[in-house]
Structures are given as C-alpha cells and as structure tokens.
Image (cartoon, rainbow, N blue to C red):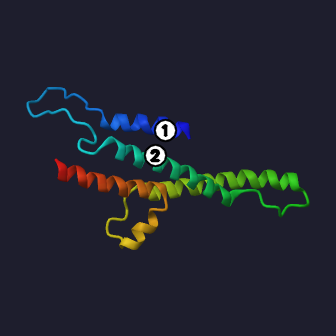
Amino acid sequence: MCIYFVLTGIVTGLCMLVFPSSGASSNSISKAIFNYTNWTVIWTILFIYSIELSTFSVFFAQFFTRRKYFYLLEYIIYYLYMNISALLAKFIAFIIWILTFIDFYPGAPVAVRYLMCLFPNTGLMFCLLVVQQYERKSG
C-alpha cells in the first residue's frame, strides 16, 4: 500500500506543477495540467484508480488459476496448461486494456457507461472527463 501512496503523490505533484513557458512567443503562458482543481481531488482519483487496478488484476487472475482436473500425467499437462493459460491471460488482459483505455463510448447509454466503470481505465477516464469539465468552467 505504501507504494501506492508514493506513486500517486509523485504523479499528482507532476500534474499540479506549473511549467514555465519558453517565452518564445508573446502569447505563451505558464500553466499546469490541472490549474483549478485541488490537489487532494487528483490524488484521491489516482489512489482509487491504483487500488481498483490491483484488485481488478487479482480478480482477473482468478480465471486462470490451476484447476484440479489433472490426475494422470499431471506434470506434463500442468506445464503445457500453465504456459498456454499465461499467454491467454496476457492476451485477454491486453485486449481488455486497449478496449477500455480509448474512449469508444461517447454516445453509449448511461447504464452502459456506468457498467463500463467496473474496468479501471474506463472509470479513470470518466473521472478525468468530469475534472476536465470543471477545469473548463473554472477558467
């Protein structure tokens, strides 16, 4: 848990850090990624995302645990099974990660959007959309 505190704090600090402008043009200004949002809101969103991501990984890994169906030639079948299931788990996790990382759902019904929030990336995306709306209204 301690690593989540540290990494979330580092990312929050980088998001709130005001980067100086280059001054190359007359209309350049110094801005941070989140100018009007309190840092505790960003930290809380990122901390909940990290906890949700780790619990989702544990939940997803339960689909690929060793089954107790092997009695004969257990070591050979188990070795082949573990290699194939590990590859399958990585492939399915990659597909889920890509499908939930990109915003394919702007016109989806609200119930579908709330259901998709069970996936960590989609939940983070919808949270940051709300923060982005707040940033636009505050500026």
- 25 shown above or below 56: above
- Which one is nearer the viewer's eye here, 92 or 61? 61
Q: Position of residue 71 (x, y in %)?
A: 90, 61
- Which one is nearer the viewer's eye here, 114 or 90? 114
**CB within 8 Å, label 2 to label 1:** yes
N-terminal-most mark, 2 or 1: 1
- 1 shown above or below 138: above
Kind of residue at badge 1? Phe
According to the picture, the residue beneath numbered tag 2 turns out to be: 47
- Which one is nearer the viewer's eye here, 47 or 98? 47
Relative horizontal placement of residue 81, taking residue 42 as reference (left or right): right
According to the picture, the residue beneath numbered tag 1 turns out to be: 5
- Residue at point 21% right, 36% down? 31
Residue furthest to the left: 26
Q: Quadrant of the N terminus?
A: top right
- Residue at point 90% right, 56% down? 73
**Badge 2, how many Cα within 10 Å: few under 14, some, many 20+?**
many
